[in-house]
Amino acid sequence: MSSTNPVAVVTGASSGIGAVYADRFAARGYDLVLVARRIERLHKLAETLSAKHGIGVRPIEADLTDEAGLIRVEELLRSDERVAVLVNNAGNGKLSSTAAMSDMDTAATIALNVVAPTRLARAVLPGFLKRDTGAIINIASVMAFQALPITTLYGATKSYLLSFSRGLLGELAATGVRVQAVLPAGTATEFYDHGGIPLSAFDPAAVMTTEDLVDAALAGFDQGEEVTLPSVHDSGLWTAYDEARAALFGATQVGVPAPRYIQA
Ligand SMILES: NC(=O)c1ccc[n+]([C@@H]2O[C@H](COP(=O)([O-])OP(=O)(O)OC[C@H]3O[C@@H](n4cnc5c(N)ncnc54)[C@H](OP(=O)(O)O)[C@@H]3O)[C@@H](O)[C@H]2O)c1
């Protein structure tokens, strides 16, 4: 890619939400770096998007649970000064109780949902800070604040991503670098088939299309939102939730046990 277009790096671009992010950033004039394991899908998407939008696309085959794959993407993020956006979208989650989940699935979910976005953010941040511009979009989930018996690990990883995003927001407040955490609810993708429960098992009325999800998330991004809940109509609910969180934290800063814990 020898253009001067800014570059958007989208992980998990071979299907679902990531593929739509790729299309939308291409439509905004970004060149793309698309990351996933299914390279043939990335090549096909690259062909479609470069023909449709006249932009450059570089597909990278990488398993982000694997050290070599992660390093390949980290190197790109560190070295390409045109990188302006990182969408940490790749994620997985076997829907299972903690005891029933295999060691391999447990490790893969933590590696993909926690370690990979953290390391990729760390790789891109020095360049963003040097240029005083750039954006990290972390695709978390509404399961960040709701645990179900089959989503314990998945929800915990998404809580991490929300907390990580919020921590970064504080660190970067005085800079030109932006962070947005996106919290989708049910969205029609392959996620559920990979997770072990087909999408058809869910109430269709509660499931959003990938296009609606990404367009709403990008509208939130354009409005400067830090945390975006595309399906929540009453934005006051998040404000109340966050104010309660801040009040709870404030109430912890007293240095003495609460009377109910003082034994006679
Ligand atoms: N769908 C929902 O209801 C929903 C709700 C809330 C949040 N989310 C989040 O949205 C994000 C995107 O998921 P989706 O719903 O669009 O599902 P999806 O269609 O299954 O997409 C997942 C993407 O992640 C990639 N991926 C999976 N394992 C990978 C690995 N080891 N290394 C590199 N890439 C890997 C997949 O590509 P390859 O298989 O080709 O590697 C695919 O491109 C995830 O973080 C998910 O947690 C989804």
Image (tube, rainbow, N blue to C red):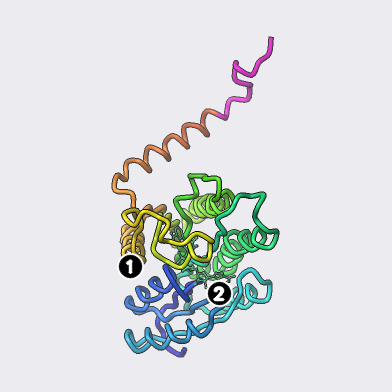
User: Hey, which quadrant is residue 235 in on the image?
Assistant: top left
Q: Mark 2 points at which residue?
A: 77
Pinpoint residue 256: horizontal percent, then vertical percent: 63, 21
* Residue depicted at 50% across the width and 32% down the height: 248
Residue 254 in magenta? yes
Q: Hey, what amino acid is under mark 1?
A: Glu
Stretch of the chain drawn in magenta? 252-264
Residue at the left extreme, as displayed: 233
Front position in the image: 67 or 133? 67
Q: How crowded is mark 1: few (under 14 residues within 10 Å), some or many (20 or more)?
A: some
User: Hey, which quadrant is residue 54 in on the image?
Assistant: bottom left
Pinpoint residue 245: horizontal percent, then vertical percent: 47, 37
Q: Residues within 10 Å of mark 2 (few under 14, many from 20)?
A: many
Pinpoint residue 109: horizontal percent, then vertical percent: 61, 60
Q: Name the residue under label 1.
A: 211
* Residue depicted at 53% across the width and 61% down the height: 195
Mark with earlier residue (2, 1): 2
Q: Give the CA separation, mark 2 to mark 1.
A: 26 Å
Quadrant showing the C terminus: top right
Magenta stretch: helix, strand or loop mostly: loop
